[in-house]
Image (cartoon, rainbow, N blue to C red):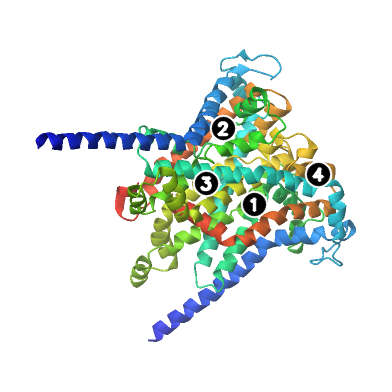
Amino acid sequence: MNNIRSKTRNKQIVDILSLTAIVILAFVALLPIWWIFRSSLMSNAEIYKFPPPFFPQNWRFSNYGKALEYFKFWQYLKNTTIIIVPSVIAGTLTATLCGYSFARLRFRGKKFIFSLCVGSMFLPSMVTLIPLYTMWTRGLGLGNTYWPLVLPYFCGGGAFSIFLLRQFIMSVPRELDEAAKIDGAGYMRILVQIIVPAIRPAMIVVALILFIGLWNDLLQQMVYINKPEKYTIAVGLTIFRGAYKSDWSNLMAATCMTFAPGVILYLIGQKYFIEGIVMTGMKN
Amino acid sequence: MINVIQKALYTRSIKSTNMARQESRAAYLFLIPAFLGLAFITYLPLASVFGLSLFKWNALTPPVFNGFNNYISLFTKDPYFLDSIKATVYFSVIAVVGSLVYSLAVAMLLNRRIPARGFWRAVFYVPYVLPGAAVYMGWSFLYETNFGLFNYVLSQLGIHKVLFLSDSSNVVPSLALISVWLSGNLIVIFLAGLQNVPRVYMEAAEIDGANAWHRFIHVTLPCMSPIILYNILMSLVTNMQIVVPALTLTNGGPGNSSMFMTYLMYRYAFQSNQLGYACAISFVFFVLIAIFTIILFATSKTWTFYEGGDDRK
């Protein structure tokens, strides 16, 4: 009896210790973001103070206005949106079409095509960059446009998305589409009216994965875009840093602006972000 | 009578071949995007990256066949290439091991009875939704030698100033730490995996008198091994391709210490127009990734454990 009681007490102690550890770790994990944010509201003189203050003395939101004079955030955000929105939509839709074929339809060469698809899953995009660059700019004359960044997403949205959606479509009960088939529905109608509603969460997840990929990309955007008025957020920020290397308050204000869209989207769609990542881990 | 049945069977088989034909026609139609992608975005470029690597080509004059000379000069003469392999592998090892340990530890803490678990999980995930270029920009300020947060904390602990990004022996570990910080997605995957570890095993081990460490080694790790394999793979492929910090902050320096392979490829191809030569780097990189992936998969059979036996392998 005593033993059991001491055991539950031990467990309680461990729980309290874990909570303490989590709180400390979470503080450490958020500290960089806070530090960048608080610096974005300080004057450079305040940034160079020692010891560094944890809170800004007065919150100088005017830094943002100053940074915006050279850092064309809204222009870059617009450009980035022009790339991301069609890419994400096209990638999700074409991946759904392909995933449906692999999951449900019988056709010759399915195994072979599917293994080609899976085989390309771990192929780093860096490997094929130069031939693709030559094809887009010299072959098709699309240098300095967004097409080389967007068009690949019209081709199935990547093997990973196709694979993920195939897994989900396979878990939809087959009786549903058999019944529709007997009622005379075509494959497209089955896909749109039965499969898509059933896998909508998975499609949102694919869209988010594609979004994160585009959002984090810098290399491809730098390779294909050279005109200042076409810069994306990532390219614009990199160029901005080159020009204002030691003006930290300006730089941090620009950095914080680029944090905002992702964080806002995350706060709105948190459930999907988290569940989506869980799904990708569990379905493979 | 027999005739009628035969006729019926005959028309039915025509019908079913018709349906099969219709089905495969629909499939090929739906797969057009994938065909285009596999052909023009994946396998043709992969073949041509090897093809181009055999040429001397500066993008202005037509390519000249060069045999394996690009590879020979990469490995014997190039002042950056061997350093770039070293930097890439060194960075990946620290980043992958660090991310896995960090994210598994946080996930295990979150898996205990923690109030507001969803909130904490969300906190650790936030870094993952920030754009890469901006993350490195922000961290370069934290790493700043005189006014940065890290050196302030170290000075409070009585440690002398560290040159995080401007010392050739510190820059790779410092950048790898950022990668660890960015691994919130791994935490979420690990946590989901931990919640699937059967309670029965845990309780059985507890009754047998296993302490927390033994339960971790003999129950948690084996049950988690497929997820660990997946996370290692994802983290490896991401970290091997590291390029953003070199593009935004270090330009490969100091010395060649952060001359990551992707960045070196970028420099040769897009700053000095040696496209054929850069393709050779890409191809070596491809082989390197392939070797790592094959080793991982081959050895994984000995250390991953699937519940329900071999049938899921």
The secondary structure type at the circle numbered 2 is: helix
Q: CA distance from mark 2 to mark 4?
A: 31 Å
Q: Which badge, 1 or 2, comes first in the chain's sequence?
A: 1
Q: Mark 1 Cα within 10 Å, few/some/many (few <14, many 20+)?
A: some
Amino acid type, residue under disc 1 in the picture = Leu
Q: Position of residue B252 (x, y in %)?
A: 71, 37
Q: Nearer the viewer, mark 3 or mark 4?
A: 4
Q: Is residue B35 above or below residue B137?
A: above
Q: Position of residue B237 (x, y in %)?
A: 54, 42
**Tag 1 residue:** B177
**Tag 2 residue:** B285
The secondary structure type at the circle numbered 4 is: helix
Q: Is residue B272 above or below residue A226?
A: above
Q: Is residue A45 found left or right of B305 in the rendered image? A: right
Q: CA distance from mark 1 to mark 4?
A: 24 Å
**Tag 4 residue:** A240
Amino acid type, residue under disc 3 in the picture = Met
Q: Nearer the viewer, mark 2 or mark 4?
A: 4
Give the residue drawn at x 65%, y 45%.
A84
Query: Residue A283 bears which disc, if any?
Result: none
Amino acid type, residue under disc 4 in the picture = Phe
Amino acid type, residue under disc 2 in the picture = Phe
Q: Nearer the viewer, mark 1 or mark 4?
A: 4
Q: Nearer the viewer, residue A74 or A257?
A: A74
Q: Which badge, 3 or 1, comes first in the chain's sequence?
A: 1
**Tag 3 residue:** B234
